[in-house]
Every structure is written in C-alpha cells, then in structure tokens.
Image: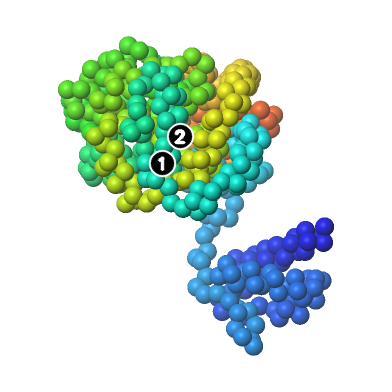
Amino acid sequence: MLARKEGTLVSSLMATVRQRIAARSLTPGARLPSIRAFAKAMQVSTSTVVEAYERLAAEGIIRPRPGSGFYVSSPLAPLSLTEIGPKLDREVDPFWVSRQSLAAGPDMLKPGCGWLPASWMRETGLRRALRALARADDATLTDYGSPLGSPALRQLLTRRMEEHGIEASPDQIILTESGTQAIDLLCRFLLEPGDTVLVDDPCYFNFHALLRAHRVNVVCIPFTPVGPDIDLFGKALVEHSPRLYVTNSAIHNPTGAVLSPVVAHRLLKLAEPAGLTIIEDDIFADFEQTPAPRLAAFDGFERVVHIGSFSKTLSASVRCGFIAAPRSWIEDLTNLKIATAFGGGRLSAELVLALLRDGSYRKHMEELRLRLSRAMNETTARLQALGFEPWIKPQAGMFLWCRLPEGLDASELARRALAQNVILAPGNAFSLSRSANGFMRFNVAQCLDDRIFDVLQAAMRECSSALWLDRLPGIGGFGTP
C-alpha cells in the first residue's frame, strides 16, 4: 500500500511539472524548484521529488546540472492549439475517425470506431496464453522471427482458409504485423507512383489513406448491396487501366454487405483480360454466420491475393496479419518484408497461435456472433426511431450503414456529437467521391450506452435548427430582408 501511494505521488508530481511546461510557466532552460523547496510546496518527502525528477530526466523532459539543479530541456515542442479541446474544425477526411477513436480517453463513447469493446474480447484466454508464453524458450522471447513467420501458424491458417474453399499451402503464406502492413507490402510490391487503383465507394477509409501514401491514382466504384456496380467496374477497367482493386468480399466495411456469387464470377472474368490484381481483405471472416463467396476460392490465386488479421477477434494490441499469394511472389515479398521490417513478430505470432488453438476460441466467436446479432437488432430499432434508415440489414458483423434523415449533414452531426464526447463516423470519411454525407456508419457493439442516442438526438435538433434558421429570409440565402 505504501509503495502504491508513493508511486501515485511520483506520478502526480511528474504530471504537475509537465503541465507547467506545457502552459509555458516553465520555459526552455528554466530552473525547476529545488528538491527541498518543491517537496515543501507539495507536502511530500524529498525522496519522492527526487524520484519524480529522475524519471522526467530519463524521459528527456528535464535535465540535471551537477551542483546546480534540474532545468527544462530545450527546445520545447511547438505549442499546438489543435491539441487543446476537441478537434471540431478539421475536415472530415480518411484520418478523421481514426484520429478521434485512437486518441480517445476513457470518457469518450465510440459508436463510430471499427473495433469491439475491450470487455467483449477474450481477456481471460489472452492472459492465460501470455502466462504460458512467459515460460517459452529464450529464443522465442528475445530473438528475431523468421521473415515468413511461424510455420505452425501458417499451417493452421491453411486449414482455416480451407473452410472457405481457399486452397493455400503454408509456403504461399507470409505473416505480417497487421492487415494494414499486408496491404502496404503488396502496394510496394505491385505499384509504382502514378498507377491506378480501384476501390469501392464507400470503402474502409484507411484504404484511401494508405493508397495516398503510395502516390497512386485512386478511382472509386459505387458499391451495391451485392458488390461493386459491375457495369461501372468494367468501364473503369477500360478507361483507367488499373493495376489493383482493393475490397472486402465477406463483410464489407462500412456497409456490412456481402459479395454475391454472380458478382464475384463477373469480377474475375473482367479482371483476367485487364491484367487486374485483386486484394481481398478478409479481416471480418470469423464474424460471418454463413460464409460468403471468396474471390480467392474461385480464382485459385491467379489474380487474387487474400489477406487477414486477428485484431478484431483476438486483440488489437497483438499485431499479427497474413498474406496468402501466388507461390512465385513469396520470395520477393519476403525480401520486401526484410527490407521494411526485418524479422517477423515472433511473440505476436506465438500468442495468436496459442489463442487459435485454444478450444474455447470457437465458443468465444459463437457468443460474439450472438451478441452482435442482438446489438444489431437493438441499435437498428433505436436509430430508426430517430429517423435513420439502414441501407441494408447486414447478415453479420458489427457495422450498420445508415441514411440520415433528409437535410442533415453527417459531418456537422459528427462535429456536434464530438463536442459531447461521442465519436461518430460520417459517411464522407469512407467516400472518395464525397457523395456519402447523407450516411453514417455505426458500430452496433459500441452503441449500447443510452447516452449515445441522447447526444445524437440533441445534435440532430441543433443541426435541424441551424438549417431552419439558414433558410429564413435575410439570414440564409433563401430570400431578402
């Protein structure tokens, strides 16, 4: 108890010093109060102040001068007004939802984020696997992993893919740090700046961000409840000669739709003569009630690359994904992985392997699917009561893509909700064409707090009032005084 109290006091003193530096009451090069004076002012022991100062020095925030005391390090980080208060004035871009959700404090509600609540994850199994992993041999705990990744996990992945009709041997699989790194490696491997890539409209916003980083041209294809608009897809192949198409074939993000077998076959028939490669992101595979068609199953890795990860079902903190690709690509992809990340994430792979081998994983997923189904029904009913209209009723998963009541602006609604500590996902964050501002994506697993709907209703009233005022003669542009 004494140790905990002492640790709390040290943390409190460190926070006080950081706050004074951030507020510019302690400027670069300024001398901190002496240990004795600070201890007296804060009513703590001198040893507590010494520990706090030493930790701050280890972080590089302050620096000691022998015989003189402690001084604020220089230079000081630039003052950023965007860090003060909610970021309400930023454009809704592909990073908007990620910025808000990843940086959110514990008091924020996140119906716009793309992951399950921590309480829904396999925390008990994860702790058990971590304890077992702590007893592993020294090499597992400290050494680099093979660039291809754990042979045992790759073997297990082949069996899992067989359940979806995908035939891939372990030597066709390379492990990555995440699904995002998998796409990044494939973009490095397949694309040059200026190439054209097709994406769905709407699609997962980080596809936009990642492709932008690779300096390629991105062309969006309108998405329907059964897949991309196949006629417009064919026209885009002729007009833009794209190298790549990135999509979800199972549970589509953000719409929750599923690719139909007919559209899947037509896509592949169009892709072959066009020389198009398709990246099939299958990150939501384990949420399905009934397996959807997989492009990789129909194609046999002629034109399709299959990727996935475990952040949505096991842990977002355990970074582990994979690429299943043509056998002839694996050596070059391995070399590229060595060049950009060196060895594999050995600890993460071993942890994922232990969790997937655990007999309780299937039961965990069955329970998750049931919980998500209940949450989908409840959230749909509550949103419809507010005037939102689901685009489709998803067969599975966590996402509900909704049309807003007529006249409401999703971006403005999201900004107003953010001011009340609720993070929403406005449609244009997912739409390259910027044509989805009348839509919003909801994560039903994150929508079980009544406060979300109270804030949403209040924000809707504010937006509606502002729209009404804007239309009054002499106030908006709809008349003259």
The residue drawn where x is 71% and y is 81% is 34
Q: Nearer the viewer, residue 89 or 198?
A: 198
* Residue 15 in the image, given as x and y percentages of width and height: 67, 63
Left or right: residue 441 versus residue 373 is left
* Residue 36 in the image, given as x and y percentages of width and height: 76, 80
Left or right: residue 223 versus residue 274 is right
Q: Nearer the viewer, residue 361 or 436?
A: 361
Q: Secondary structure at mark 1?
A: loop
* Residue 336 in the image, given as x and y percentages of width and height: 30, 46
Where 369 falls versus 345 (above or below)? above
Q: Residue furthest bottom?
A: 67
Q: Is residue 433 visible?
A: no
Where 287 falls versus 153 (above or below)? above
Q: Which residue is mark 1?
A: 149
- The reply to whether discs 1 and 2 touch (Cβ–Cβ < 8 Å) is yes
- The circle drawn on residue 153 is 2
Q: Residue furthest top?
A: 262
* Residue 323 in the image, given as x and y percentages of width and height: 36, 34
Left or right: residue 188 versus residue 315 is left
Q: Amino acid at mark 2?
A: Leu
Q: Nearer the viewer, residue 410 or 284?
A: 284
Q: Residues within 10 Å of mark 1 (few under 14, many from 20)?
A: many
Q: Is residue 105 visible?
A: yes
Where 255 falls versus 116 (above or below)? above
The residue drawn where x is 31% and y is 43% is 334
> What is the image's colouring?
rainbow
The residue drawn where x is 44% and y is 43% is 177
Q: Secondary structure at mark 2?
A: helix
Q: Residues within 10 Å of mark 2 (few under 14, many from 20)?
A: many
Q: Amino acid at mark 1?
A: Gly
